[in-house]
Amino acid sequence: MSNTLPHDVFTGAAKDYQMMAHALAYLGEHWYDQPDYKQAAKAAGLSPHHFHKVFTRWAGLSPKRYVGTLAHNAAQNVLQAGGTVEDASFEVGLSSPSRLHDLFIKHEALSPGEAKSKAAGVDMVWGVSPCPFGLAVGLVSPRGLSAYGFCDPGGEQAAFEDFARRYPRANYTRNDHAICEITQSIFSGGVVPVALYGTAFQLQVWKALLAVGSGETVRYMDIANAIENSKAVRAVGAAIGANPISWVIPCHRILGADKRLTGYHWGVDRKRAMLAYEEARRA
């Protein structure tokens, strides 16, 4: 895979940004009122259809999803400041707490109340399974796989605690059989429901990771270029480091600027084994 993108990609991104600047300002000022996207298109000097296409190409998410992200962040700030779900609903201009619930389910793996309470009362399952890279440790919420990583024998509890810090007040039950079934599906090419949470930027980076094929490697700067944000290499690195579902979202395929193996949360030796495993299977 090339380490750089064609020049016309950057030219197109720059041209898109010039059109999007006014639209972003409009959406930023009017998100509370659930804005008319025709007006946003007018601010960009485009037809509604063309605006949706260009905005999605430039931002990596639709205008509606972008507005939802702004509302989600505002609601999260209210909840973290001690406000109630009703307060948060009023703050972001939603008609009822049920609509706020829908917003959080879309952007996180938790409801607003669950997010505020650090998943208090939420039933989650964790477990350990053999896999091609030692032991796999998984965490499953009621909505899907929320974390997946690896360890050596004896490191199971530490890996679980690493995941549990994300949801410190959830109810945890160990079920190795459930994680074994998920692991079997993952490594046999099956489909596993995933419950991802993260910022719009993190989701954009994780989506770019999914485009890196098995047996291929890229650099952090390549991912930054792929999301058309070439100056955000550090932020891209942080988003890759925050990836909660290893292997499924292939952060192990990222190399340093000098193309050497860099730090990997589950160990550089394991990362090397993963790349060798994929290369062998591809060959």
Image: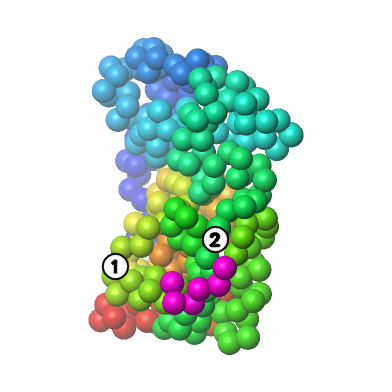
Crowd tier of the residue under label 1, counting other residues whose Cα lies within 10 Å: few below 14, some 14–19, many 20 or above: few
Q: What is the quadrant of residue 37 in the picture?
A: top left
**Which mark, by number, is residue 96?**
none
Foreground label between 1 and 2: 2
Residue 174 is a magenta residue: yes
Query: What amino acid is found at the position of numbered circle 1 in the picture?
Result: Gly
Quadrant, the C terminus:
bottom left
Question: Does the CB distance between marks 1 and 2 fall below 8 Å?
Answer: no
Task: Say what secondary structure mark 1 lies in.
Answer: loop
Q: In what element is the residue under mark 2?
A: strand
Name the residue carrying label 2: 124
Instruction: Indicate the position of residue 161 as horizontal and vertical percent values.
Output: 66, 68
Residue nearer the viewer, 162 or 14: 162
- The residue wearing badge 1 is 190
Q: CA distance from mark 1 to mark 2?
A: 22 Å
Amino acid type at circle 2 is Met
Which residue occupies the foreground of this view, 38 or 79?
79
Q: Is residue 47 left or right of residue 84?
A: left
Q: Tell me if residue 122 is in the magenta stretch.
A: no
Q: Residue at x 50, y 81 (%)?
A: 135
Left or right, residue 42 beside residue 81: left
Question: Residues in magenta?
Answer: 173-178
